[in-house]
């Protein structure tokens, strides 16, 4: 027999899992819209531009959390083809969550 606390706990986990999934989908959509012309944004595949790193490998270059400020204030690159991008705080959280979810082991 489940106690009311156990049922409430299961409901909270279910709601949290759906929120996490929605956040991951939002992060993926933002990266697809803004970055996939040059970068591979998923767990597999090559970047359309060979010189653009696949996002699943970013964790080998930087701690993913360290990208948070740059994404919010305006991320710039040393090459002229990459536009400066800045995202809203909620979007930054979704992007960071998605990036963490696709990192290669």
Image (cartoon, helix red, strand yellow):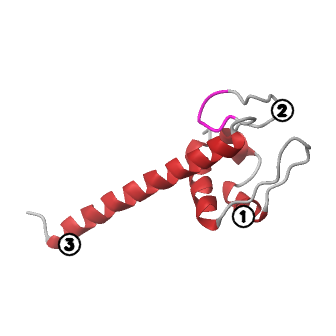
Question: Residue at point 20% right, 72% down?
Answer: 5
Provide the residue designation for mark 1.
72
Horizontal side of residue 23 vs 96, given as left or right: left
Residue 92 in the image: above or below residue 34: below
Q: Which dot marks residue 45?
A: none
Q: Position of residue 33 (x, y in %)?
A: 65, 43
Q: Name the dominant secondary structure of the magenta segment.
A: loop
CA distance separating discs 3 and 1: 39 Å
Q: Position of residue 13 (x, y in %)?
A: 33, 61
| CB-based contact (under 8 Å), mark 3 and mark 2 | no
Quadrant where the C terminus lies? top right
Relative height, residue 54 to residue 16 (above, below): above
Residue range corresponding to the magenta coloring: 40-45
Q: Earlier in the sequence, mark 1 or mark 2?
A: 2
Residue at figure coordinates x 74%, y 28% from the top left = 48
Q: Position of residue 97 (x, y in %)?
A: 57, 54
Q: Is residue 42 magenta?
A: yes
Nearer the N terminus, badge 3 or badge 1? Answer: 3
Foreground residue, 35 or 41?
A: 35
Q: Is residue 52 magenta?
A: no
Q: CA distance from mark 3 to mark 2?
A: 53 Å
Mark 3 / mark 2, whichever is N-terminal: 3
76 or 64: nearer the eye?
76
| Image quarter of residue 51 | top right
Task: Say which residue label 3 marks.
Answer: 5
């Amino acid at each position: 027999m489940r106690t009311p606390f156990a049922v409430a706990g299961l409901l909270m986990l279910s709601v949290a899992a759906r929120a996490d999934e929605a956040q991951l989908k939002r992060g993926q959509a933002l990266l697809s819209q803004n970055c996939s012309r040059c970068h591979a944004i998923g767990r597999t595949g090559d970047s359309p531009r060979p010189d653009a790193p696949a996002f699943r490998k970013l964790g080998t270059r930087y701690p993913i959390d360290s990208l948070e400020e740059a994404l919010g204030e305006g991320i710039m690159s040393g090459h002229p083809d990459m536009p400066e991008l800045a995202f809203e705080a909620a979007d930054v959280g979704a992007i960071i969550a998605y990036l963490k979810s696709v990192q290669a082991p």
